Amino acid sequence: MVWEITTEELLKKYTSGKRNFAGAVVVRNKTSGRSYIDLEGAILRDINFRGADLSFADLRGADLSGADLFGASLIEARLDNAIIRDANLECVTLCGCNLTNADLTGTALDYMNATDAIFRGAKLTPFGHAVLTEADFRGATPALHDMICRGMNFIDKTIMFDGTIEFGPYFGEWKSISK
């Protein structure tokens, strides 16, 4: 089920104890005048955003620990400095998303589409079957080459932890990895 909710309504319902926003299309408040959906610094722990559309959301510094974002759309969302520990981001769309210095420790990221996503300085957990076309992992930790070039991840023009570029296209584990 797809339904629209403003950020103001979302925060009010979350504060009153509601956690299930599966399938929601979060829209910006008409009076805010901002082009982004303003959820900067919001505490949204254990929220269910399964299949939700949070494209163009400003979630900088937000706490999404334990959140279920399976299949959610976060196209061009701003998640820099966000805390997204032990969450479910499987099958999520992160195209053009900024996750600079985000804490994704313990978070499931399998099958994500991270085309043009920025993970600079992010804390990561191993993942597989991801699309990493022109993704940027400079300074991310742990800085393990095999974490990116493994698990059938699709790699093409991907910027690695040390700033080198893995040109492709190829699937991780299909190319011999030399360190």
Image (spheres, helix red, strand yellow):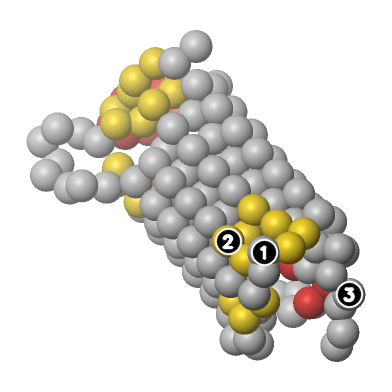
The numbered mark, 1 or 2, whose residue comes first in the sequence reads: 2
Residue 64 visible at all:
no
Which mark is drawn over residue 169? 1
Q: Position of residue 95 (x, y in %)?
A: 48, 51
Residue 25 in view = yes
At numbered mark 3, what does the secondary structure look like: helix, strand or loop? Answer: loop
Classify residue 25 by image quadrant.
Answer: top left
User: Which residue type carries mark 1?
Assistant: Pro
Judging by the rendered image, the residue that carries numbered circle 2 is 133
- Measuring 44% from the left and 32% from the top, which residue is drawn there? 53
Position above or below: 34 against 142: above
Q: Name which quarter of the figure residue 126 lies in.
A: bottom right
Q: Position of residue 127 (x, y in %)?
A: 77, 55
Location of residue 154 in the rendering, given as x and y in whole percent from the top left corner: 70, 57
Kindly identify the amino acid type of the residue bearing the numbered disc 3: Ser
Q: Nearer the viewer, residue 77 or 156?
A: 156
Disc 3 residue crowd, few under 14, some 14–19, many 20+, Cα 10 Å: few
Distance from disc 1 to disc 2, alpha carbons, whole Å, reads 8 Å
Nearest the viewer among 117 and 24 is 117
- Which residue is under mark 3? 176
Q: CA distance from mark 1 to mark 3?
A: 14 Å
Name the residue located 77 percent from the left edge and 59 percent from the top edge: 171
* Amino acid of disc 2: Thr
Q: Answer yes or no: do the residues labelled 1 and 2 have beta carbons within 8 Å? A: yes
Q: Is residue 17 left or right of residue 108?
A: left
